[in-house]
Image: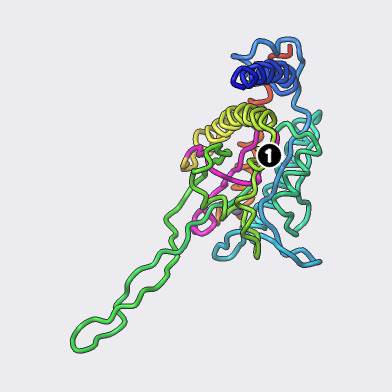
């Protein structure tokens, strides 16, 4: 019984090695550590640009409106930046195909976004979002009774958040899921958060493979996020909360290096002005494009 099991394991592992070798050719890791890529001629051919959130679709149904600012909405800012990013990438990387997960104001569910990215065999997935802090609650004196102050708990906006944040998908399932809920929430739909690739556990080999691939994409995602963050901070002088690994569902389901860019806090007045300005949007786009260009040069250099 035991022997049979270990035989099965050995067979399984050798299959895995063969698979991994094959996969490595298709999806290179960091060029400096993966010498097997030397003659693959890997090229970044498709970049998927994902404008976060959106309006309720005309046919109705679930949608994720995103965070509100004082005078603007996350869903409009993300679309404006994503369109500019599409234009800039098409202009500066003419050999690369750019795929948008949404073209108009209407929301596309996160699962569909990932499907679009995967169906187009994206080599990079960039999701554009705006950050926001939830209201904070404070206790306020609203009057006096018997010479004692009467308190009331009130909600006030927390505008203290500022700057960029880069999210990559965390393989840590116990990690903070609040962001996943916030970034992926679709009205009237709560069960999405527990849906994940984990339910493929009936095929252990597939699960191991999936984890290996995810780990590879995770490293590449972190690297790309680092490059974008460096451009934001060093060229644009933005404040940054850095690169964070978090459970973000749209990133979980994309089979490619994927980064979610929180371009600024829409509920902070200064950031909101920046996010809505031509200058701000152009800077954000230019920084992302420079980072992608660097990343592309790195992964393609191996093919030369
Ligand atoms: Zn968002």
Is residue 250 on the magenta stretch?
Answer: yes
Q: Is residue 263 left or right of residue 38?
A: left
Residue at 67% across / 58% down in the picture? Answer: 76
**239 or 34, which lies in front?**
34
**87 or 115, which lies in front?**
115
Q: Residue furthest front?
A: 1
Mark 1 — residue? 200
Residue 245 place in picture, x, y as percent:
52, 39
Residues in magenta?
242-271
Q: Is residue 68 left or right of residue 199?
A: left
- Number of other residues with Cα within 10 Å of mark 1, as a class: few under 14, some 14 to 19, many 20 or more: few
Residue 29: quadrant of the picture: top right
Residue at 47% across / 50% down in the picture? Answer: 162
Q: Secondary structure at mark 1?
A: helix
**236 or 7, which lies in front?**
7
Residue 77: quadrant of the picture: bottom right
Residue 237 place in picture, x, y as percent:
49, 39
Residue at 70% across / 58% down in the picture? Answer: 54
**259 or 252, which lies in front?**
252
Residue 291 visible in image = no
Residue 218 place in picture, x, y as percent:
59, 31
Residue at 54% across / 52% down in the picture? Answer: 131
In the image, residue 32 above or below residue 172 = above
Residue 53 visible in image = yes
Quarter of the image with the C terminus is top right
Disc 1 C-beta below 8 A from ligand 1: no
In the image, residue 105 above or below residue 22 = below
Quarter of the image with the N terminus is top right
């Amino acid at each position: 019984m035991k022997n049979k099991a270990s035989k099965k394991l050995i067979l399984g592992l050798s299959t895995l090695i063969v698979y991994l070798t094959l996969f490595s050719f298709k999806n290179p890791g960091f060029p400096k550590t993966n010498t097997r890529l030397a003659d693959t001629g890997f090229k970044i051919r498709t970049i998927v640009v994902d404008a976060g959130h959106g309006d309720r679709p005309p046919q109705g149904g679930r949608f994720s409106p995103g965070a509100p600012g004082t005078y603007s909405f996350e869903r409009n800012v993300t679309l404006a930046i994503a369109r500019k990013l599409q234009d800039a990438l098409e202009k500066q990387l003419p050999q690369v195909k750019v795929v948008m997960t949404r073209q108009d104001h209407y929301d596309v569910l996160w699962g569909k976004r990932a499907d679009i990215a995967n169906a187009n065999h994206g080599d990079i997935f960039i999701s554009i979002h705006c950050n926001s802090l939830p209201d904070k609650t404070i206790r306020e004196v609203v009057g006096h009774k018997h010479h004692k102050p009467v308190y009331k708990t009130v909600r006030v906006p927390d505008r203290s958040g500022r700057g960029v944040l880069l999210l990559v998908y965390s393989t840590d399932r116990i990690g903070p899921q609040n962001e996943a809920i916030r970034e992926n929430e679709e009205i009237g739909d709560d069960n999405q958060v527990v849906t994940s690739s984990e339910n493929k556990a009936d095929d252990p080999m597939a699960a191991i493979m999936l984890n290996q691939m995810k780990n590879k994409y995770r490293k590449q995602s972190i690297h790309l996020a680092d490059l974008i963050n460096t451009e934001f901070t060093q060229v644009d002088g933005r404040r940054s909360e850095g690169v964070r690994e978090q459970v973000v569902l749209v990133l979980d389901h994309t089979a490619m290096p994927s980064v979610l860019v929180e371009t600024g806090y829409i509920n902070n007045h200064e950031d909101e002005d920046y996010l809505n300005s031509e200058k701000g949007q152009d800077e954000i786009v230019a920084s992302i494009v420079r980072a992608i260009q660097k990343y592309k040069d790195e992964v393609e250099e191996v093919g030369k």
